[in-house]
Amino acid sequence: MHRTGRGSRPGAPPAGPSTPLATGAARRRVRRWRAVPSTAVLLALTAGCASLSDPARSAVTERTSDDRPVRDGGTLTVALKSEPDKLDPTLAETLVGRTVFAAMCEKLYDIDRSGKIVPQLASALPRTSDGGRTVTITLRRGLRFSDGTQLNARAAAASLMRHRYLPGSARATELAPLKSAVAAGPYTLTLHLAQPYVPLTAVLADRAGMVLSPRAVKKYGKNFSNHPSCVGPFKFVERVTGDRIVLKKDPLYYDADHVHLDEVVFKPIPDGSVRLANLRAGDVQVGDQMDPVDVRSALTEKNLQLFASPSLGYQGIGFNVGNTRGLGQKPGKIDTPIARDPRVREAFELSLDRDVINKVVFQGMYAPACGPVSPKSAIAPAAPGCPGRDLKKAKQLLKEAGVKLPVRLELKVSTSPVDIRFGQVVQAMAKDAGFAVRLAPTEYTTMLQETDAGRYDAYSSGWSGRLDPDGNIASFLGTRGAMNTYGVSDPDIDRLIAEGRATAGEKARARIYADLTRRIRDQHTLIYLYRNNNYVVARRDVAGVKVYDDGLVRVKEAGYAR
């Protein structure tokens, strides 16, 4: 599951009445599975998968863009893995939502195909003074929001302060050091920080750096997500819940000459095989977050092409250890074996085999992982050795913890076939150690709301990732983290997060994040299991699509090949 990452992140804020998310029966769509395949069956599946996955994996090379010339005009339909959450950059959390934003809401900064941060709405990289506590950003001139309002320093300052202080903001932790943002001139933005903040530029290369039309924010207020207005190649037209989000080319966009399409339509299609069938039929032209089994199939199709890049994020399982009152509230106590004793959580982790999960569920096309920092990060600590499956030790830990067997818990997963398959494999492995896992496949947006509210034992948790390691950790595992769905509260983790944010120098920061990774792993609250690749399949007649390490499908320069 990917949250804005929680796109593959764990959860979005509870939808208010104005939020066009699934309602009624769809929101309550929760099923429970108890059938557990044997470990012997899993090992047999593993043997079968190995021979299939190796040729496919060797045929998949990193390819992030298609630079063929395109013609003007036409509509491009992009199939998303799930329904996006709120189309409000302050509140949004999902990866699929970030892909929609990439088409309509530009940021102060962006990343290029090499992963380097580059100016976007800003005209240059930030300048710092006062020991890193004052940051000056110069904006590009002559830019207009989709509603015609001029983008200037006052608009940028207002957006940053909204991202920082709006109740329920998913950006609050990312911008926690920000004390104030002011317009020092028409196009000069000055940020005053409580302390030096090394990750700031990377933070402003994502949703915290999106600038919103002040006119639209004032006019629509809490209903802004139904009328989003930013600076971007396409502007919002309509959203039909569960069916489509429609954007049209914005004639006010400053770089409109490089925008070729008339319209972009985003359609949520959770089942990867259905996304692939729609691609084959031509009903959609681009499929995001394609499952490995569908990637293998697409490689043999002459009318389809594949884009692939490594992920900056992670996927795994998160446990509720203290989320008793919902996001943003002080963590409390949960009296269950899995919540109160890290030995029980460690035993659960030791019941799992990352290599088998990768082969059985993902055709061997992902990479096992056991930490929050992507190897792609410039300050990634030395890769920790992932613990192997150790049933003997797992059973001993449960004995030491004095828990009654089997240890019962519910695991929420989304309703996509691959996520259910993941849950079934985890369920089978955990049974061998003494756990009775009940699967609860849950409609995606409902799962986000329930995990945010703390109504869960464990869930399939993930994040699409950020260039700076802080973006993979602070919001999720800091005591006051804006997306701390787990209820984690650990003074050592909080201290190391603060040190990582304030320390300059790659070697020094790498040491801090190595210590932080060890402390996180000691807690066993978020079990990192694998790091997916970004697989996007498009029809062969589509060109100009870009897919970088952040996993976003960029369609600004996309179109139909000449």
Image (cartoon, grey):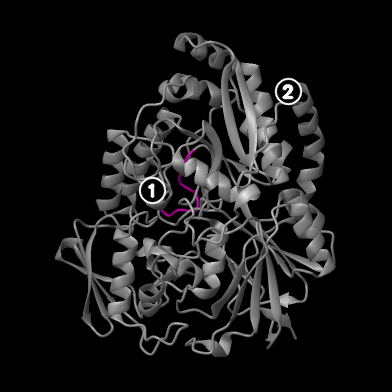
Give the residue type at disc 2.
Answer: Thr
Q: Is residue 66 above or below residue 485?
A: below
Q: Which label is found at residue 135? A: none
Q: To which quarter of the image does residue 513 belong?
A: top left
Q: Position of residue 192 (x, y in %)?
A: 20, 65
> Is 547 within the magenta?
no
Q: Position of residue 483 (x, y in %)?
A: 41, 47
Residue tagged by mark 1? Answer: 475
Disc with the residue nearer the chain's start (1 vs 2):
2
Q: Residue at x 37, y 49 (%)?
A: 482
Farthest residue to the left: give it: 130
Q: Which residues are magenta?
A: 371-378
Q: Is residue 532 visible?
A: no
Q: Is residue 83 visible?
A: yes
Q: Position of residue 279 (x, y in %)?
A: 78, 65
Q: Residue at x 38, y 61 (%)?
A: 203
- Is label 1 in contact with label 2 (beta carbons under 8 Å)? no
219, 107: nearer the viewer: 219
Residue tagged by mark 2? Answer: 39
200, 68: nearer the viewer: 200
Kindly report which numbered mark, 1 or 2, lies closer to the viewer in this rendering: 1
Q: Is residue 477 above or below residue 469?
A: above
